Structure formats: C-alpha cells, structure tokens
Image (spheres, rainbow, N blue to C red):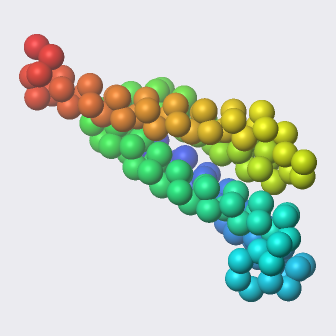
Amino acid sequence: MTTAFYAGLLTIVFIVLSFRVIAKRNQYKVALGSNGQELLQRAVRVHANFAEYVPFALLLMFLAEYSGLAPMYLHVMGIALFIGRLSHAYGVSQQPEPLKFRVFGMVLTLLVMLLAAMASIVLYALRSGWLT
C-alpha cells in the first residue's frame, strides 16, 4: 500500500509538530490558547492546519489507490503532499512570515487533494461503465 508509506512519513511530521507546540507551551507557561505569544500561536496553527488537511488528503489518496490508481501517481501525490506540508509548516512558523512558503504548501496540498479526488471519480466512472 503506497498510501500507508506516506501516512507513516506524515505521522512522524505530525508528532514533530506536536512536540514543537508542547515546547512552546512550556517556554511561555501557557496551557491553553496562546496568551498573546505570536510564536506559540504560529506553532498551534501549523499543527492544527496539518491535522485539518493531511487526514483528508490521505483518505483521498487511499481511495484512489483502492480504486486502482497506479503506484507511480500515488508516489507523486505523496511526495507533493509531504513537501507541501513541510513548506507550509516552515512558512507559517517564521516571524516575519515568508508568505511564498505558506502559499506553495497550500497549493501543493490542495492540488494533491484535487488530483486524488478526480482520480477516484474517473476510476469509478470507468469501472461502472459511465465512460464507455
């Protein structure tokens, strides 16, 4: 399962982002929220944004894989998702924020989601006879 490989890689990134939030909370002695600490707020949003997009992207990739999408395409999507999430995390974590990293990361993430969704739709249509 190609998607499982990228799920594993991205889980490691998620854990690293979790530890970054924990470290910032300890540094600023803030249990909830950000108490106005800009770098803590950025760490929280990087972690949350990752949690909001990655599971859905992986689900779409898995469905495309389950529907028969070739591993080569899944690797392209997985690498793009991984690079996109790293770029987004880097950009949002910086103060001041270099917006190009955030935008690049979101474009790659949304592109992966769109491609996986379209692949799933097309593969379903082919199997069900819609396109014949």
Which image quadrant is residue 24 in?
bottom right
Quadrant occupied by the C terminus: top left
Relative to 33, say whether 82 is above or below: above
Q: Position of residue 21 (x, y in %)?
A: 76, 70
Relative to 56, say whether 106 is above or below: above
Horizontal relation, residue 128 to residue 34: left or right: left
Horizontal relation, residue 95 to residue 12: left or right: right
Q: Position of residue 131 (x, y in %)?
A: 15, 16
Horizontal relation, residue 56 to residue 32: left or right: left
The residue under the point 35% across, 29% down is 118
The residue under the point 52% across, 36% down is 110
Relative to 33, say whether 45 is above or below: above
Q: Position of residue 14 (x, y in %)?
A: 64, 61
Along the line of sight, which residue is nearer the eye, 36 or 51? 36
Q: Determine the residue located farthest toward the top in the rendered image.
A: 132
Which image quadrant is residue 120 in?
top left
User: Is any atom of residue 2 visible in this view?
Assistant: yes
